[in-house]
Image (tube, rainbow, N blue to C red):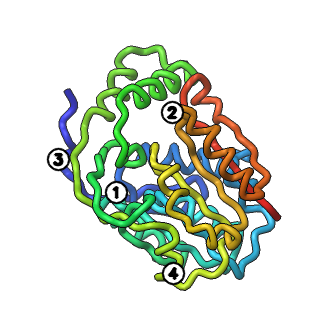
């Protein structure tokens, strides 16, 4: 059984381009940055092409801000609104936006279908896997897919990976809706809505009022395909007039995690 880390202070991590960020866990930061920035075929890279700088990028489930840094690099001067509920992760997010995305706004909250409060399960070793919607079966399925696809055959390495997921704590967080956030921060046009919220993606979309959808140019989101959720989300977005593409990162082949890009520009 893994124990929680004794030192919960943020750590400095150097990205592949030489910039430093604050991270909850350095290994996780390196993995995420590699997926976003170092992969020439990343969906985030495609999502950012041609975005106008006079619109806003909203990052729901912003983690420590690496996606915000990536998007701001590709659309200089764009306004960024980043939302993250976990307190320790949010502290890193604020610091990283101050360093690398001046003018960006960080909001400490979860995003759902309606406002209120909820219990977040926070994982200090893998903060990006923190969730309002715990599902052990789905978690194990994706972890085993990752082990298989990365050829992780060493049982000790697998045990460490499983152990990282076992360490968690709960925290009460405020929940808001995307429509409320846009109103609060006077967001007129959203060039890109990015959603990565560990099984809460459908609730985020349900919190968008019908009159708000025409103001959103593109959506990129991670979807956990549980109980037909992927098809439901694709149908929702296609019905709103978006051109939708679905892909799956090779490391999650056989798992439930898919990436969706919806655009109408």
Residue 46 appears in which quarter of the rendering? Answer: bottom right
Q: Seen in the image, is 209 located left or right of residue 47?
A: left
Q: Which residue is mark 3?
A: 6
Closer to viewer: mark 1 or mark 2: 2
Q: Of tags 3 and 2, which is closer to the observer?
A: 2
As measured in the structure, the alpha-carbon distance from the residue carrying label 1 to the one carrying label 3 is: 13 Å
On screen, residue 19 above or below 80: above
Label 4's element?
helix
Dot 2: what SS?
A: loop
Along the polypeptide, which appears first: circle 4 or circle 3?
3
Distance of label 2 from label 4 (alpha carbons): 31 Å
For label 2, the residue is 226
Residue toward you, 191 or 157: 191
At 55% across and 57% down in the image, what residue appears? 205
* Disc nearer the start of the sequence (1/2): 1
Instruction: Measuring from the top left, give residue 1's x and y in whole percent.
Output: 19, 26
Residue found at the far bottom of this picture: 186
Q: Is residue 108 above or below residue 66?
A: below
Please give the residue where the numbered disc 1 appears in the rendered image: 11
Q: Nearer the viewer, mark 4 or mark 3?
A: 4
What's the distance in space between the residues labelled 4 and 3, CA to CA? 40 Å
**Picture residue at 63% right of the left edge, 81% below the top:** 188
Who comes first in sequence, dot 3 or dot 2? 3
């Amino acid at each position: 059984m893994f124990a929680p880390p004794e030192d919960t202070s943020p750590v400095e991590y150097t990205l592949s381009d030489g910039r430093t960020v604050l991270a909850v866990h350095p290994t996780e930061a390196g993995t995420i940055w590699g997926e976003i920035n170092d992969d020439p075929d990343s969906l985030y890279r495609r999502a950012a092409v041609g975005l106008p700088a006079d619109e806003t990028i909203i990052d729901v489930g912003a983690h420590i801000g690496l996606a915000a840094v990536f998007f701001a690099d590709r659309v200089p001067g764009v306004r960024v609104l980043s939302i993250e509920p976990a307190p320790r992760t949010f502290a890193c997010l604020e610091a990283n936006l101050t360093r690398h995305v001046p003018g960006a706004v960080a909001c400490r909250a979860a995003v759902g279908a309606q406002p209120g409060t909820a219990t977040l399960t926070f994982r200090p070793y893998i903060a990006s896997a923190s969730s309002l919607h715990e599902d052990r079966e789905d978690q194990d399925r994706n972890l085993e897919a990752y082990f298989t696809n990365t050829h992780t055959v060493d049982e000790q390495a697998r045990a460490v990976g499983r152990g990282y997921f076992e360490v968690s704590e709960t925290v009460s967080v405020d929940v808001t809706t995307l429509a409320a956030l846009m109103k609060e921060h006077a967001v007129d046009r959203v060039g890109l809505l990015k959603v990565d919220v560990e099984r809460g993606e459908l609730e985020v979309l349900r919190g968008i009022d019908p009159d708000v959808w025409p103001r959103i140019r593109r959506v990129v989101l991670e979807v956990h395909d549980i109980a037909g959720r992927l098809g439901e989300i694709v149908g929702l977005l296609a019905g709103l007039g978006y051109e939708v593409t679905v892909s799956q990162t090779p490391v999650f082949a056989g798992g439930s995690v898919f990436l969706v890009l919806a655009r109408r520009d």
